[in-house]
Image (tube, rainbow, N blue to C red):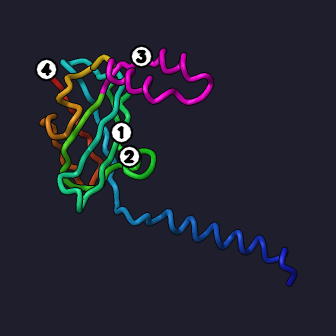
Amino acid sequence: MRPLARFPALVGGLLLLVLAGCADDGIGKRYPVSGTITYNGEPVPHGNIFFVPDDPNTGRAATGTIENGRYRLSTAGKNDGALPGSYKIRIVAKEIDTSQVLANAGGGAGRQDDIIAANQSAKLLIPAKYELETTSGLTATVEEKSNTIDFALTD
C-alpha cells in the first residue's frame, strides 16, 4: 500500500482518539449551574461570578459571566457547569472607562499602566466586599443535578 493511501485512515484514527479524549477530560462530571444576581432588587447589568471550592484539594473553581442579572457557570468549557460540592462565592461588577487604554493602544493591545489605571478608577456596581470570597459572605452548594442558585446582594 502506498504511504498516501494510509493517510485518510491515520487521520481518522487520530480524530477518534481526540474525540474519545474529550468524552472524559479527567476533571469529573459537572452539573449545570445558573441563576440571577441582583443588587438592591435590581439585576446586576454585567460582571463575573466565581465559585471557589471550599477545599481546593478536592474541588475546582467555576466561573460565569453576568449579563442582565443572569449567569451560567463553566469549569473547563462553555457553560459545562460545576463539580458538585461546597463553594465560597465572589462577584466582580464594575464600569471600566477604557477610553485612555484605547487611545494609547495604537492598534495593538493596551499598555499595562493604562489598563491598571482604568481598573483602579472603575465605578463599582456592587459593594467591594463581594469581590473576595473571604469577605463576600456568599456560599453555595452544587448538587448532582441541574442547579439554580440566585444571589440577592445588598449594601
Report how far apart the C-alphas of labels 4 and 2 lie in the structure.
28 Å
Pointer 4 or 3: first along the chain: 3
Pointer 3 or 2: first along the chain: 2
Report how far apart the C-alphas of labels 1 and 2 lie in the structure.
6 Å
Amino acid at circle 3: Asp
Quarter-of-image position of residue 83: bottom left
Amino acid at circle 4: Asp
Pointer 4 or 2: first along the chain: 2
Lateral position of residue 22 relative to residue 116, left or right: right
Residue that badge 4 annotates:
155
Callout 4 crowding tier (Cα within 10 Å): few <14, some 14–19, many ≥20: few
Secondary structure beneath dot 1 equals strand
Callout 3 crowding tier (Cα within 10 Å): few <14, some 14–19, many ≥20: some
Residue 64 got which mark?
Answer: 1
The residue segment tinted magenta is 93-121
Is 48 inside the magenta-drawn segment? no
Residue that badge 3 annotates:
97
Are the two marked residues, 4 and 3, in contact with CB atoms closer than 8 angstroms? Answer: no
Are the two marked residues, 1 and 3, in contact with CB atoms closer than 8 angstroms? Answer: no
Residue drawn at (45%, 30%), measured in percent from left and top?
Answer: 112
Pointer 1 or 3: first along the chain: 1
Secondary structure beneath dot 2 equals loop
Callout 2 crowding tier (Cα within 10 Å): few <14, some 14–19, many ≥20: many
Are the two marked residues, 1 and 2, in contact with CB atoms closer than 8 angstroms? Answer: yes
Q: Residue furthest front?
A: 113
